[in-house]
């Protein structure tokens, strides 16, 4: 799909995903949010709770550090326990220090005190924020995320991740959301490949995907046309239906 | 977790994942299979149906090409339509040619003829296999996957992906499967962080993870201890229960 929309990557951090214990869902959620505001998600990486892997991935993905994409969103590894190494790794990737952030401490302490929760050293560990970063509000619980360079660092707990995504979306650059139309045909993919390719060549600015499925003994294909101009997508779908004699 | 198990990465190829249309499931499935046979999954990448992105990812991930991990498994992009570019990208990554593979043609033609399906050029496109690659059998449908260098190239359709995983598992090097024990405590993560860290320091060969959750107004934490030696995992869990006075 031709687009000059801003681009993005997602970095998911967590041993529990790689071990198969947890099925990743935050990237799937954010992929839909980004698509709806016209940011083109180009890559997702999932790495372990490992300092060096996280540093390397951030540098490879955040354009402000010479990486590939305009924006980077991370999920996971910012909790209070020893296996939460994301904040330190982000500081290292950006070559800045990390210390207790007074605004984070204040926000967290107020929230905890209102709930009668004791403020411990472990809890305050979550107020350690890389220098020069700004906070990402957390409407769901106490500990904030943060934003540094073109990277948005958010929690892995799904409800907190979503709250942080909602907080950052209004500040993101946006593009034209892509629109798509889908067509289910009860023919195997190879029977529709010629027609699909011809229509794709006639509409080079659109993206055409085909996704085979099997239902009992029948083979079928979902055809998806995606682009920035809804009228052109509809034209292409009409052309595809005609070409496939549907 | 200390381990000299073989390592692996998964590369998922597909615009439909990045657009949010489809929730990825093949990597989650394979992560569990790899864990069960003692292969340490270290990284998952998801990229578009884009030649250059696929080439770069394969070279970064397959040790036989100077990449990071012992083995690479790919999912997606080997169908018959114009948006299926994986086979050509794999050939480019390994710097070999690609042409119709006679064994693939024979296997596919036999299967199609037994079902009365016409053998078309589009179908035969799926027999284009990088030179020097060996085939990965497909017990589910006609088109095979393939194996080149340390990379196993498999289909994205979940049922076909699983059939190909079953076909390659017997040939993979294996290690010691990790075992884990989990403990759910109805305390917030920061209340158990000290105990967890102390036990983690006493059992440096094990991995200890903590995963917070919320149930109504109660905060809780799932504690997971993982390692190669089940007896040590049990010892560590006993120590953790004692430390947390459970």
Image: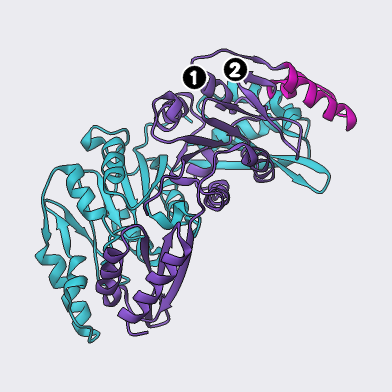
Chain colours: A purple, B cyan
Quarter containing the N terminus of chain A: bottom left
Between the C-alphas of marks 2 and 1, the distance is 10 Å
State the extent of the magenta-drawn residues as a range.
A102-126
Q: Is residue B6 left or right of residue B17?
A: left
Which residue corresponds to the image point at 28% horizontal and 74% vertical from the top-left?
A: A195
Residue nearer the viewer, B193 or B228: B193
Front position among marks 2 and 1: 2
Residue nearer the viewer, A87 or A101: A101
* Image quadrant where residue A182 sits: bottom left
Up the image or down, B145 lies above or below B205; here it is below
Up the image or down, B179 lies above or below B241; here it is below
Residue nearer the viewer, A174 or A188: A174
Chain where mark 2 sits: A
Residue nearer the viewer, A239 or A155: A239
Residue holding disc 2: A132
Count of numbered circles on the image: 2
Q: Is residue B103 left or right of residue B36?
A: left
Residue holding disc 1: A94
| Magenta span: chief secondary structure | helix
Q: Are marks 2 and 1 in contact (CB under 8 Å)?
A: yes
Residue A132 visible within the image: yes
């Amino acid at each position: 799909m031709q687009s000059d929309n801003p681009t993005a990557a997602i970095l998911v951090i967590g041993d529990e995903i790689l071990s198969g214990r947890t099925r990743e869902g935050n990237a799937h959620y954010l992929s839909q949010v980004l698509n709806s505001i016209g940011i083109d998600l180009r890559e997702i990486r999932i790495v372990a709770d490992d300092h060096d892997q996280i540093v390397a991935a951030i540098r490879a993905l955040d354009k402000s550090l010479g990486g590939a994409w305009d924006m980077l969103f991370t999920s996971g590894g910012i909790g209070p326990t020893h296996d939460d190494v994301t904040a330190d790794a982000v500081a290292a990737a950006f070559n800045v220090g990390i210390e207790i952030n007074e605004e984070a401490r204040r926000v967290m302490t107020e929230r905890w005190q209102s709930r009668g929760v004791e403020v411990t050293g472990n809890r305050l560990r979550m107020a350690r924020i890389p220098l020069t970063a700004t906070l990402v509000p957390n409407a769901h619980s106490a500990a904030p995320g943060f934003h540094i360079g073109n990277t948005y660092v958010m929690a892995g707990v799904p409800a907190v991740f979503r709250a942080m995504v909602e907080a950052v979306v209004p500040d993101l650059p946006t593009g034209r959301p892509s629109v798509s139309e889908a067509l289910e045909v009860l023919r195997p993919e190879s029977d529709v490949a010629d027609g699909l390719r011809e229509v794709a060549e006639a509409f080079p600015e659109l993206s055409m995907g085909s996704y085979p499925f099997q239902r009992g003994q029948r083979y079928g294909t979902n055809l998806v046309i995606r682009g920035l101009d809804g009228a052109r997508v509809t034209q292409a779908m009409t052309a595809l239906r005609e070409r496939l004699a549907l």
